[in-house]
Amino acid sequence: MDGGNAAAEKEKKKEEEVKGERTSPRGSGRVPHDAEKVSATGLGDHRDGGSSGTLKRASPTHCPAANGFVHLDLRNPGRQAEPANNNINFRAAQWRIAAPPGRQPLPSSHIPVPRHRNPSGHADKEVMAATVLTSLSTSPLVLNTSPAVPEPASRAWKEVLSASYSSSTSGNWSWDASDQSVPSTPSPPLSNNVSKNFLLSSRGDDVIEDAAESPHFMFEDPIPRKRKNSMKVMFKCLWKNCELVLSTSLGIQRHVRSAHLGRGSDSDYSDGEEDFYYTEIEVNMDSLTEGLSSLTPTSPTTSGPQPVFPQPHTSNAYPHAANAYPHAANAYPQAANAYPQAANGSNAVPHSQNIAVAGPHGGPSPTLLSQSAPSMLYHIHTDHAYQGPQGRTTGERRQPAAAASTSVTPPPKSNSGTRKPRGDAKKCRKVYGMEKRDMWCTACRWKKACQRFTD
DNA sequence: CTTGCCGGGAA
DNA sequence: TTCCCGGCAAG
């Protein structure tokens, strides 16, 4: 009898204790819970300090807008086969020194990535135009900062271009104030539409395509940053029955050329006719990603082939990949190692094969995609990938490289919906009360589903 | 608020 | 495996 009472009392006490404790976390819902878990697993390095710290170390300034462009620089060190651990310092130095002496293959730190990718004449044209535009909007002085190094012509303009980029967006690397004394022609912030479009249409192709080619940068930062303004400019094919949407004008032009105008798919030649067959549209990326998140509840590593839902997939798969790379290269030299895993394990890449499209607005049917050459589809990824940098101006959450390789999100409560509805029947607890807990069915005692009074 | 019980940890 | 409990979510 003692025992029983004691036990009951104890229980009661406990229960009360619990209650007392319970009230406080109330309302916080799952968030803290999950957050806690995340951090516990080491997945969520949600401290800004930690994450951006690495980046900061590499960059002389903390200019947030730089994100989008850092990667341009990052790649060079790699190419030059610099020791990984030297990268940071080396790069930092480069940023300060406009024109390093000697015959560095790539004297300027901001030399754009585009390696030996086959330069399409068209792209050149476009970039040239972009260059002009850019130079118009930035100080001429800035252009001078780009060291005149004997290089192939193509490289020359690229340099100029990149110089402009750097100055107009992340203009304060090191030579900022001193060099550019042209306040009257303020460089457009990265976030504004002009530069955004600009990025998408011209440079986007250039760089992003590269990103696709060298995927080592597509790891890390599995947590897609929140885009504030998630409207994205896309290019939609107007050809009848073809609603292909690509994220780059170049891409859409190629598509039109090859798919509809019957030109060689790789033909560089453009007579401008394509322009009539596509239009610009705005797509709300948020809804895309939202859709995605609900569609891909499981981690890529474990999931098998998934139902094809191309649209959302694209949008999501790439954002983080993209964000990843700007700092990835320097922050995590070993990142390259991590990547292979990601590439193999995750199905992000495979999936993307037929994406290409579609806004949330009940977009084009997937079938249409098949019309377009697969190669086209690349553009969209890359572009999406590129989205990342734009949206993040403040520090964003990053994850250790290791975690990045596995999955994007912590295994979601996959079957949270399966929780069985509460029955009407009174359970042991209610029937017997706390005092007679020993009369409860074991399940009830264990806070499991009651076995005695089932529904 | 109370109650049922899932998910997961400890013994 | 058994037992326990934090905490979510329905009511």
Image (cartoon, coloured by chain):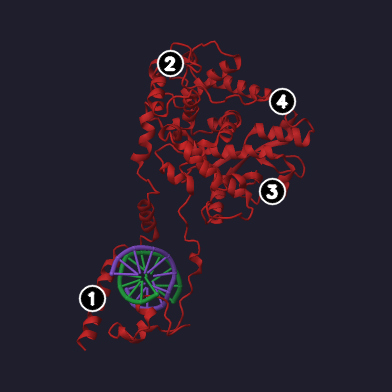
Chain colours: A red, B purple, C green
In this orientation, which residue lies closer to the viewer: A6 or A129?
Answer: A6
How far from the left and from the top, in percent, is residue A386? 54, 36
First in residue order: circle 3 vs circle 4: 4
Q: Amino acid at mark 4?
A: Asp
First in residue order: circle 3 vs circle 2: 2
Label 2: state its secondary structure: loop
Which dot marks residue A224? none
Chain of the residue where label 1 is placed in the rendered structure:
A
Q: Is residue A428 left or right of residue A268?
A: left
> Which residue is painted at 63% across and 34% down in the image?
A248
First in residue order: circle 4 vs circle 2: 2
* Mark 2 vs 1: CB contact within 8 A: no
Query: Which residue is labeled 2 in the image?
Result: A98
Label 4: state its secondary structure: loop
> Which residue is painted at 59% across and 40% down in the image?
A381
Crowding at mark 4 (Cα within 10 Å: few <14, some 14-19, many 20+): some
Q: Amino acid at mark 3?
A: Pro
Query: Which residue is labeled 3 in the image?
Result: A364
Chain of the residue where label 3 is placed in the rendered structure:
A
* Mark 4 vs 2: CB contact within 8 A: no
